[in-house]
Amino acid sequence: MTTNDDERYAVRLGDRLRRVRQQQGLSLHDVEARSSGELKASVVGAYERGERAVSITRLHRMADFYRVPVAELLPVPGVAANIATEAAPELVIDLVALEARRDAEPALARYAEAIQSRRGDYNGRVLTVRAADLEMLAAILAASPDELRSRLAATGIVR
């Protein structure tokens, strides 16, 4: 790996760390407080920005703190981060509303669970359905993506 590769990897790792922290609704200061100062806000922030290297020991400690497998914090090799695409979600499912309507939307509930499992999404309150997932889900439910979006909006399942 070259220095540029190392820097890109550090930024991608930082993006993963930030995403997991934010999915859990934690600020950097929350992390410091809840870890009794073991994980300093300034240091975690530097990891998230890719400005500081994370040791294996510290990565394991952070995974334990966030209650996720270490593998969920590591970037996938060969997959470039596309923050612009991820920042513009196609559809956001309210998982609490979906659970309340599980009997009316069993296929959607199962599909949402599969997406969560595949992504390792530990948020538990909302699920962003990407364009490819939305197209597949629409096909399964015999609707166009726009029809599905409208149907789910009418039931209060999407935000």
Image: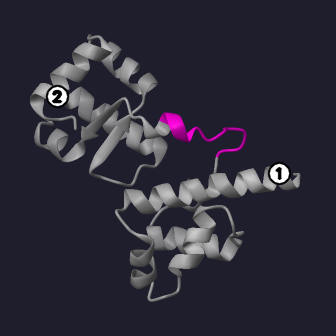
Which secondary structure is most common in the magenta stretch? loop
Disc 1 on helix, strand or loop? helix
| Mark 2 neighbour class, 10 Å CA radius: few under 14, some 14 to 19, many 20 or more | some
Which kind of residue does numbered mark 1 sit on? Asn
Q: Residue furthest bottom?
A: 36
> What distance separates the C-alpha of mark 1 from that of mark 2?
44 Å
Q: Please tell me which residue is depicted at 63% across the width and 56% down the height of the picture.
A: 13
x, y percent for residue 48: 58, 63
Give the residue drawn at x 26%, y 37%. 93
Q: Give the vertical position of 18 relative to 96 (above or below).
A: below
Range of magenta residues: 76-85
Q: Amino acid at mark 2?
A: Ala
Q: Is residue 159 magenta?
A: no
As drawn, is 51 to the left or to the right of 71? Answer: right
Mark identifier at residue 153? 2
Q: Quadrant of the C terminus?
A: top left
Compared to residue 102, the image places residue 56 above or below, namely: below
**Side of 14 relative to 23 (left or right):** right
On the image, the x and y values in percent for residue 143 come to: 26, 11
Q: Residue at x 64, y 50 (%)?
A: 75
Q: Image point 17% across, 35% down: which residue? A: 157
> Circle 2 — which element?
helix
In the rendered image, the residue lying farthest to the right is 2
Sort mark 1 into few (<14), some (14-19) or many (20+) by Cα contacts within 10 Å. few
Q: Which residue is mark 1?
A: 4
The coloring applied to the image is one colour
User: Can residue 23 be seen at all in this image of the molecule?
Assistant: yes
